[in-house]
Image: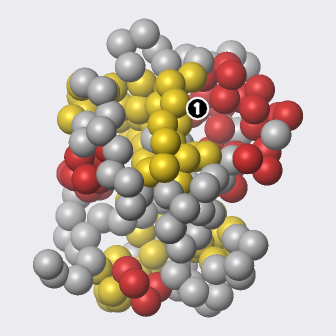
């Protein structure tokens, strides 16, 4: 199996090289490219996932449907579709970029840093998820408004990138969430 590479970026979000994914997430993580996706079903429910306990960053934390790293030269929408299949066994329809300039930096309890330029997408699920246990501990379909209520009342249960993303009214509108 080939080594998964992430795309390293400069402060203007231009590619400046690559590095093996396994070596990037440390206490001094360089800025790199990622994608984040929120998946809705035909009833307008949102798929949340709980990160696998073996994940290097934020193990066991509830987050958006999935995230991932585009490979060198890979189009963002193609990376979204690939990661949906790899993490959740899902095919997607209606993949739409809603936060094209999202960037965040966060430090987890172990000191590992996430430092990503991470455009955010919304898509529709085609079928039911079949999570990859190394990526996802469990899944839940929730009303978008319930996610916003959880973000207000129990933010410590959710990933920091999800909290920043759902604060943006463009994403709330795309999810059909109130306010």
Q: Is residue 128 left or right of residue 153?
A: left
Q: Residue at x 53, y 54 (%)?
A: 51
Does residue 49 lie above or below 116 as drawn?
above
80 vs 168, nearest the viewer: 80
Q: Is residue 64 left or right of residue 20?
A: right
* Residue 65 image offset from top left, x and y in percent: 46, 41
Is any atom of residue 71 visible in this view?
yes
Q: Residue at x 75, y 32 (%)?
A: 150
Q: Quadrant of the N terminus?
A: bottom left
Does residue 135 lie above or below 41 as drawn?
below
Q: Which residue is mark 1?
A: 170
Is any atom of residue 100 visible in this view?
no
Q: Residue at x 82, y 34 (%)?
A: 152
* Residue 33 image offset from top left, x and y in percent: 41, 69
Q: Residue at x 50, y 57 (%)?
A: 52
* Residue 160 image offset from top left, x and y in percent: 69, 55
Furthest residue to the top? Answer: 43
How crowded pointer 1 is (Cα within 10 Å; few <14, some 14-19, many 20+) is rated as: few
132 vs 4, nearest the viewer: 132
Q: Quadrant of the C terminus?
A: top right
């Amino acid at each position: 199996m080939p080594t998964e590479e992430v795309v390293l970026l400069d402060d203007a979000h231009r590619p400046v090289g690559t590095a093996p994914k396994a070596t990037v997430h440390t206490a001094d993580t360089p800025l790199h490219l990622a994608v984040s996706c929120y998946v809705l079903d035909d009833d307008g429910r949102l798929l949340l996932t709980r990160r696998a306990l073996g994940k290097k960053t934020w193990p066991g934390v509830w987050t958006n449907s999935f995230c991932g790293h585009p490979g060198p030269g890979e189009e963002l929408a193609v990376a979204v579709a690939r990661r949906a299949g790899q993490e959740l066994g899902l095919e997607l329809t209606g993949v739409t970029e809603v936060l094209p300039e999202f960037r965040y930096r966060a430090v987890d309890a172990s000191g590992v840093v996430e430092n990503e330029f991470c455009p955010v997408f919304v898509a529709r699920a085609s079928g039911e998820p079949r999570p990859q246990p190394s990526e996802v501990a469990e899944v839940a379909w929730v009303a978008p408004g319930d996610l916003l209520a959880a973000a207000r009342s129990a933010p410590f249960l959710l990933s920091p990138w999800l909290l920043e993303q759902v604060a943006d009214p463009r994403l709330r509108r795309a999810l059909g969430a109130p306010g």
